[in-house]
Image (cartoon, grey):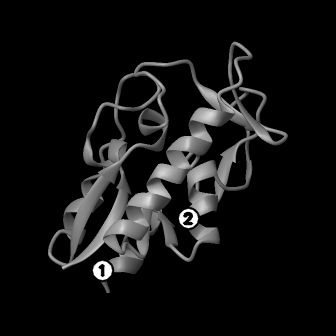
Amino acid sequence: MEKILISACLVGDNCKYNGGNNLSPKLESLLDKYELIPFCPEVEGGLPTPRNPSEIKDSGVFMDNGEDVTRAYEWGARKALMLCLYLKIKIAVLKERSPSCGTHHIHDGTFSDKLIDGMGITAKLLKENGINVYSEDEIDQLIN
């Protein structure tokens, strides 16, 4: 069975910045065809749960209190890529709008809930390395 890397928050892991999750009922439709490998780049990069919200601004990632957490995001992204390479994972389903996992849209860096076109740190690294990256809104494309 083919493996898919999936944002851990989407399978119900409480690793979201506020201690919650983003459980997606759509994931059940993938289970007949894929083995899901949950992964949270932010936690794997060393950030605690809960934690202050972070957004990408300029070339870094910053918490709403101004703390630069770019290194943690980059480390989590590298760990995600290493896992994909080790397990020969070619597909990732990631949480849209996340500074790690956003596939098409991320917050604009002002903590004002404004979205812009862009990719999170992990999504971008995976895509640059040949992993097909989808958001949770695109799961239907993987079932057909």
Instruction: Please tell me which residue lies in front, 54 or 85.
Output: 85
Image position, residue 42 (x, y; %): 48, 36
Mark 2–mark 1 Cα distance, whole angstroms, equals 21 Å
Marks counted in the figure total 2
Query: Outermost residue, left direction?
Result: 32
Pointer 1 local density, CA inside 10 Å: few below 14, some 14–19, many at least 20: few
Rendered view: 44 above or below 78: above
Instruction: Please tell me which residue lies in front, 133 or 139.
Output: 133
Rendered view: 105 above or below 134: above
Check the picture and name the quadrant holding the N terminus.
bottom left
Residue 96 appearing in the image: yes
Instruction: Please tell me which residue lies in front, 140 or 120.
Output: 120
Image position, residue 63 (x, y; %): 66, 22
Query: Residue type at mark 2?
Result: Leu
Pointer 2 local density, CA inside 10 Å: few below 14, some 14–19, many at least 20: many
Residue for point 66% across, 55% down = 119
Query: Residue type at mark 1?
Result: Ile
Disc 2 and disc 1 in contact, CB within 8 angstroms: no
Q: Which mark is residue 126?
A: 2
Q: What residue did someone put label 1 on? A: 143
Query: Outermost residue, top direction?
Result: 65
Residue 95 appearing in the image: no
Rendered view: 72 above or below 63: below
Residue for point 26% across, 41% down = 12
Quadrant hosting residue 6: bottom left
Q: Mark 1 falls on what kind of element?
A: helix
Which is nearer the N-term, disc 2 or disc 1? 2
Quadrant hosting residue 34: bottom left
Q: Mark 2 falls on what kind of element?
A: helix
Image position, residue 122 (x, y; %): 56, 53
